[in-house]
Image (tube, coloured by chain):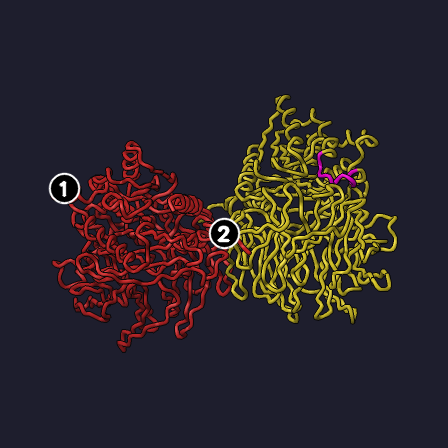
Chain colours: A red, B yellow
């Protein structure tokens, strides 16, 4: 009776980027593009009808709510440039009042003191490589540096209840992040030994002396550890087999830690009583948690998605089990059970390594028999059971999608994640190819009906696969993928540079490897139709990367389309641009069925 | 601490145009521009979090919900052209499925049969002057004409429960509308005598034989009457002194009529038991009701505004008194008590006639001492205690606003409303001038600090006041105002034409009067700075009207600015256009303070 859903129906499902709850829990403030562009919106609980608080129409995150209810702090960037500036707005919304502005620089992880007088944050404004963390006095407008970055990009993560010690993390690479406490003028590492690379990814003060955090020090999967500042003592608190952790929060009133674990492609939620040591797995309303907050009353708020459910907020009262869905984000005109939940497949790669993959099978009634290989971005990231509007749109159009978590992906232990380091173009590439062979063998794809698409590292991998294995693919889409690792290494943001040698390679010492791993080396072989998509303001993969490959291929007379989004960065912040891009991708693929 | 609210903060307060409730009352569907453009949105009660149902980004009204819950009927026009087409969408939303489309023509007042198989509506597609009403069979796609328009624009208003009789209204002018019932092939007038002009504005079948309706037959103020079809008997049911009625609904379950009255500048809500004849005034959550619905269970839903509260929906359970606010529309960053509630003033005009007016006094702290005279549109309309985003914006910028309900306005009885007929340019004009004199006398305005602005008839009046009383005004804004009554009479939609002679005048018989009343006659005197605003697609006041006056004034070297909105009609359907227009108006006035 009704027409096939349009791309807009999928893309009008919005994202909730961030949220914060007022201390009295009467107001929930969240950042969403429900109206097309991002803005802050409010909800006066128990009423769930939202109202806009800003009209800036830009991406906003880093929300802090003054405990006395006088104002909200928020960070806005511009057209995806990631140079977030800090603003204040009243709880009833209105015009942004600039608080910390340094055009062209970032201001991240804002933390507001309990009395609302001091705003802590980290910025690259004075040190683009290692960053500095600041304490800004809102009333006097004075500012002091509290942490000098050194050795790696250094971010302030939490402040102690009495604001006399600071937890900060040094980021060397995705697999090498160390945490320290600065107390008085002493800097104390949280993990006992720093020689072997490991990570500390998240931490929280439970009291002035006790810090709980997530680390994989001495282990393959991360676990919850504690650092006792008084005793300067490190101890392991909770670890689970084949399950790493990604988020930790503390409920002081009930002396409970809440943490989120990654078990394969889904998240799990736990509480842990720090007095009785009782660990409880909680029912989780969603497959993937993007943010978790615990209020002073011990009520839990979270935002997250599932493969078939876009971004929604949920609340659970401290002593209850039931989650209440606060928002009602859904795909317009499509029932949740008409969306595709992926199968989780596992296969052995060329060297015997086990690879997990998501396989989204188009409804047989509407399937066009084609499978899109999607190498994810990152590369130290994973394709998980999260809502993906583009996947669901392409599935609805009849395409199946294969998304392998090739070596280097997160969620499978530290060793697995590190396997991409210095090996961008070999193992991960063959994991993708072995994945396709696995599909062919099991009748999940036809050898002559494979398409290829990826963004960021996935765009790089799409270019590389196209250059080295063109016979597998009928058509290729590259979204902001680096084409030349030499110029990529030069053009990334300053604070990425310290980790680049380990991550990608050194332009001189690893020259041959970088040549071997650069898609541009294989331009001659890129014989299949290609669509290249690029944001003009992308600070991570600069436009020149895409310009270069398009120019050369056009010169060679290859079939190549180039779509540049003038007001976008790395990814798309504006609905209308997303609609344009994904419609273009589908139309491009449709031509080659 | 915070900046003055921006025009966008006022204009982001949205409008709820129309709504409909599913038969089980689990879904509320409403048309709103909450995201900038109009679309249908849904709400799954009791959850109040809304979700979009369409992505058409155009004005939509005429909502009908299939009682079996299978689909919703909605009318969309395009860029304000008022040529609404009828579409079907599933309750979960999605792409529009065209049902009745005739490009360039209107389809209005859709009524769905109880079984959802027949769609009744009125259209000008076959008779642009008098219109026809149709019954479209959704399953078979066959259509039959059920009412042939005749003598005046003829609209089907309601169908009897067993669909064997039809209530329709003939529109001769705002003060002359007659209602009839068509049963078998007989056409029966609802009011006893048709010779003296009167109106029937709203009616409803309470059963196959009983029709309740609003008329002012034989009276100055309208009242509730009943027509007994079996006995062919007219009777008066409820009348109230100095209070007319505007809306009537029937609750079959509790045999209650609900009706809305206009008492001066505010609405009142009543229920009336048709068995016991008990009339009850109900608490009303809002000053002005735009739509009222009573469900099968007797629950009451309404949408409306107050001077300080934008469009919101409310619900009251059948046997309860308390209204529950379902939406949370507000002016961003401005507390309701910071918005201005107008004083209701009354003054005697040049001939002793009492005129009521709203006077919005800017906060003395921020006032710039200037008063804007706002002659309302219509002219058979009134300025009431409704939310007006532009007024509140201009008030916040320091302007006070004076809005007289000059002769011809509605809400003060039929005789008062009829006073503008054939007298467009004399009495109403002097009522405006006398209003200013009243302000001067009472210290509510300074003689050298008056500005003038109006739209539609108010734009006409602004032009005329400028041409005949330029000494009163420092600057003038005209929004889509007719400048030449001869060409206006020619260019209005076909179905307006039958009433134009009575309403405005006859181009030949009333030639001298039309010359006297046409602003273009006084171009020479229009010496003050002027801003003219016009929608390019306006079907009521065509763009040539504004083009003409601008061209001549420019030729004369007068200070005149011209702002044409390419994608708008009579009024503004797009937020971004509103922002542009009202910012331009404020900047224009600011120049002449």
Task: Give the quarter of the image for residue A218.
Answer: bottom left
Looking at this view, is B269 or B54 the one in front? B54
Where does residue B95 sit, x and y in percent of width and height? 53, 52
Q: Residue at x 27, y 34 (%)?
A: A552
Left or right side of B357 for A435: left
User: Is residue B494 within the magenta segment?
Assistant: yes
Where does residue B583 sit, x and y in percent of width and height? 54, 39
Q: To which residue does mark 1 refer?
A: A511
Q: Dots 2 and 1: beta carbons under 8 Å?
A: no
Pointer 1: residues within 10 angstroms few (<14), some, or many (20+)? some
Task: Give the quarter of the image for residue B20.
Answer: bottom right
Tell me the subunit letter for badge 1: A
Residue placed furthest toward the bottom? A276
Q: Residue A71: tell me if it is visible.
A: no
Q: To which residue does mark 2 refer?
A: B333
Task: Give the quarter of the image for residue A234.
Answer: bottom left
Left or right side of B61 for A150: left
Q: Residue A96: tell me if it is visible.
A: yes
Q: Distance of mark 2 from mark 1, alpha carbons?
A: 57 Å
Where does residue B319 sit, x and y in percent of width and height? 66, 71
User: Is residue A141 within the magenta segment?
Assistant: no
Where does residue B102 sit, x and y in percent of width and height? 65, 44
Pointer 2: residues within 10 angstroms few (<14), some, or many (20+)? many
Prevailing secondary structure class for the magenta stretch in the rendered image? helix
Q: Which residues are magenta?
A: B491-500
Residue A426 got which mark?
Answer: none
Looking at this view, is A131 or B5 the one in front? A131
Q: Residue at x 69, y 43 (%)?
A: B125
From the image, state whether disc 2 or disc 1 is nearer to you. 1
């Amino acid at each position: 009776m009704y027409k096939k859903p349009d791309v807009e129906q999928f893309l009008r499902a919005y994202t909730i980027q961030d949220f914060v709850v007022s201390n009295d829990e009467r107001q929930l403030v969240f950042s969403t593009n429900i109206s097309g562009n991002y803005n802050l919106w409010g909800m006066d609980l128990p009423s769930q009808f939202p109202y806009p608080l800003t009209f800036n129409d830009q991406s906003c995150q880093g929300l802090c709510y003054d405990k006395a209810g006088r104002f909200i702090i928020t960070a806005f960037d511009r057209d995806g440039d990631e140079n977030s500036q800090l603003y204040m707005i009243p709880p009833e919304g209105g015009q942004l009042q600039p608080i910390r502005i340094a055009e062209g620089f970032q201001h991240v992880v804002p933390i507001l003191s309990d009395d609302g007088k001091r705003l802590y944050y980290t910025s690259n404004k004075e040190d683009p490589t290692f960053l500095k963390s600041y304490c800004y006095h809102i009333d006097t407008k004075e500012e002091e540096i509290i942490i000098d970055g050194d050795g790696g990009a250094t971010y302030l993560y939490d402040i102690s209840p009495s604001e006399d010690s600071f937890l900060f993390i040094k980021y060397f690479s995705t697999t090498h992040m160390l945490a320290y406490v600065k107390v008085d003028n002493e800097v104390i590492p949280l993990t006992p030994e720093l020689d072997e690379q490991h990570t500390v990814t998240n931490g929280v003060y439970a009291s002035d002396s006790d810090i709980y955090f997530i680390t994989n020090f001495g282990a393959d999967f991360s676990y919850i550890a504690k650092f006792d500042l008084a005793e300067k003592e490190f101890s392991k608190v909770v670890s689970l087999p084949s399950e790493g952790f990604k988020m930790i929060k503390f409920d002081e009133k009930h002396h409970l830690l809440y943490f989120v674990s990654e078990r394969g492609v889904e998240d799990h939620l736990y509480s842990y009583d720090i007095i009785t040591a009782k660990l409880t797995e909680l029912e989780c309303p969603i497959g993937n948690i993007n943010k978790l907050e615990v209020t002073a009353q011990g009520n839990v708020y979270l935002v997250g998605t599932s493969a078939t459910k876009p971004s929604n907020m949920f609340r659970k009262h401290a002593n209850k089990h039931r989650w209440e869905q606060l928002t009602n984000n859904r795909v317009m005109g499509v029932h949740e059970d008409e969306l595709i939940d992926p199968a989780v497949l596992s296969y052995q790669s060329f060297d015997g390594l086990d690879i997990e993959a998501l396989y989204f099978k188009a409804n047989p009634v509407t399937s066009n028999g084609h499978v899109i290989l999607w190498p994810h971005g990152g590369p130290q990231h994973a394709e998980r059971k999260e809502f993906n509007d583009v996947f669901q749109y392409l599935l609805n159009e009849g395409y199946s999608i294969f998304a392998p978590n090739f070596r280097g992906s997160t969620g499978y232990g530290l060793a697995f994640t590190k396997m991409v380091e210095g090996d961008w173009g070999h193992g991960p590439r063959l994991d993708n190819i072995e994945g396709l062979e696995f599909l062919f063998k099991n009748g999940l794809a036809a050898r002559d009906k494979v398409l290829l698409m990826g963004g960021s590292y996935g765009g790089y991998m799409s270019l590389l696969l196209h250059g080295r294995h063109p016979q597998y693919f009928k058509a290729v889409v590259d979204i902001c993928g680096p084409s030349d690792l030499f110029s990529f290494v030069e053009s990334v943001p300053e604070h990425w540079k310290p980790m680049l040698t380990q991550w990608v390679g050194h332009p001189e010492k690893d020259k041959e490897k970088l040549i071997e791993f650069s898609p541009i080396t294989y331009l001659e072989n890129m014989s299949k139709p290609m669509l290249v998509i690029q944001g003009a303001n992308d600070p991570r993969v600069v436009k020149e990367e895409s310009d270069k490959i398009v120019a050369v291929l056009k010169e060679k007379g290859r079939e190549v389309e180039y779509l540049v989004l003038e007001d976008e960065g790395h990814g798309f912040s504006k609905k209308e641009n997303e609609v344009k891009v994904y419609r273009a991708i589908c139309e491009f693929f449709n031509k080659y069925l």
